Image (spheres, rainbow, N blue to C red):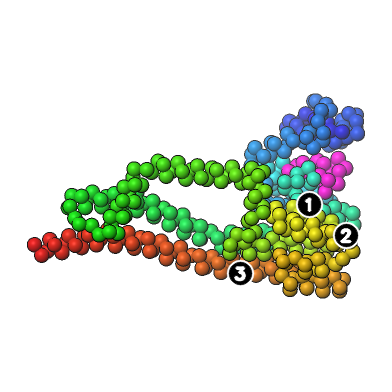
Amino acid sequence: MSFAYQAIDRSGHPIRDVIEAGSLDEAARLLRTRGLLVTRLSETADEPAAAREPARGRGSRRGRVRWKELVYFTQQMAMLLGSGARMISALAALETQTKNPAMLNLVHHLRRRVEDGVPLSAAMADRPEIFDGVYRSLTASGESTGRMVEAFDQIATYTRRRQEVRQKIIGALIYPCLLIVMCFGVMVGMFGFVLPRFRQLFLVLDADLPASTRIMMGLADWFDGHWLLVLFTLAAAITSAVLLFRSPLGQRWWAGVYTDIPVAGALIRRLILAKLFRIWGVLVANNVGLIDAIHLARSATRSTAFLGLMDRVEKAVTEGRRLGEALQESPLVLPTMAAAVLTGEESGRLGNSLLFVAEAMESENTQIVTSLARIIEPAILILMGAVVGLVAISLFMPMFDIATLAGGG
C-alpha cells in the first residue's frame, strides 16, 4: 500500500513524499525510524506507481536526467560498492553530490525505496524512462547472485560504451550540419539582401543583363515579394513533420521505412545490429536467459524489420534451435556475424562472442560515419562555393560590360 506523508526532518526542512508499507501504523513506524516528525499521513487513492507521480513531476519540472548523468551515477555506484559501501550508504553519498534537481529527485527516490526494503531493481522500475529493461535486469541479476559490484561494473561498461558510440556519431555529424546551416544562411543573405541592392544599381544604369543575371534577379524579386509565404511554408512543413512523427500512425510508418532509406539505411541497420548484439552479450554474460535477453532487447529499436527479426529469433530459440542458426536465415545480419555467434554458442562462450561482434561493429560503424562526414563536408563546401560563384559571376559580368563601355566611350 502507498501512503502520502508530510514531515519535518532533523534539520527542520519540510518533506512531502510517498512511502510503501503494509499498514498506516507500519508507515508511521518507518517514518519515525528515519528521524522524521510526521505532520500528515494518509493512504493514497491510486495505485503505487500513480501515487509516486508527484515526486516524479517535481523533478521533471526542474529539468531531466541526461544520459551522461546516468553514466556518472552508474560509475559512482560501481566505485562506492566496490570500496565496500552498503547500498543505502552509496545512494546517500550520491544524493549529497548531485546538483541537477531531476537527478537529485531520482537518487532520493531510490534511496527511500531501498530503505523501505524494496529491491533496487524494483525501485528502478518506477522510472522506466530512465532505467531501461537491460539496466534493471543486470541490477536484478546482481541482487539475486549477491554480486552487485560486478553487476554495476557491467552496467557501467554498458552505459559508457553507449555514450561513447553516441558521442562519436554526434561529433562526426556536427560539422556537416553546421555547414548546411551556413549554406542556407548564405543563400538567404544572397537572395534577400545582396541581389536586391544590385537590382537597383542595374535599373539606374539601364544595363543589358545576361540571362544568368536576369534569372538571379527574377529569383531575388520573387523572394522579396513572397518571403512571408516562404517562411510560412517552411514553418508549416516543419510543424507538419513533427506532428506526423509524433502521431501513432506516423511512428508506425517511420518504423517501417527508416531502415530502408537509400545509403543511410545500411548504416542505420548496422547501428541497430551493434546495439542488439551488445545488449544480448551483456545480458547473457551476466547469466540472464537468452530468451529473456532477446525479449529485453526489443526496447532498443522501433524498426518493424528488426522487431520481426527478434520475433523469429525468439521463436527459433524457444524451439531449441541455436541463435546463430536463426541469425543466418535473416538478410539483416551479415553472414560473418552470424557465423561468429554460432561459433561462440558451440564453444560455450555465447556472451563473449556477442560482445566481440558488438565491439567490432561499433568500431566499423564509427569509421563509416567519420568517412561519410569527411565526404559530405567537401561536397557541401563545393555546392556552397558553386552557388556563391554563380551569383558573383552573374552580378559582376554586367559590371565589367558597363566598365568596358564607359572606358571605350
Foreground label between 2 and 1: 2
Label 3 amino acid? Gln
Query: Looking at the image, is 49 positioned above or below residue 67?
Result: above
Residue 146: image quadrant is: bottom right
Label 2 amino acid? Thr
Question: For the magenta stretch, what is the residue range?
Answer: 106-123
Mark 3 or mark 1: name the one nearer the start of the chain. 1
Residue indicated by mark 3: 367
Total number of numbered discs in the rendering: 3
Q: Position of residue 169 (x, y in %)?
A: 60, 61
Q: Position of residue 180 (x, y in %)?
A: 47, 57
* Residue 152 appears anywhere in the view: no
Label 1 amino acid? Gly
- Look at 87% across and 71% down and name the residue there: 348
| Mark 3 → mark 2, Cα distance in angstroms | 36 Å
Residue 325: image quadrant is: bottom right
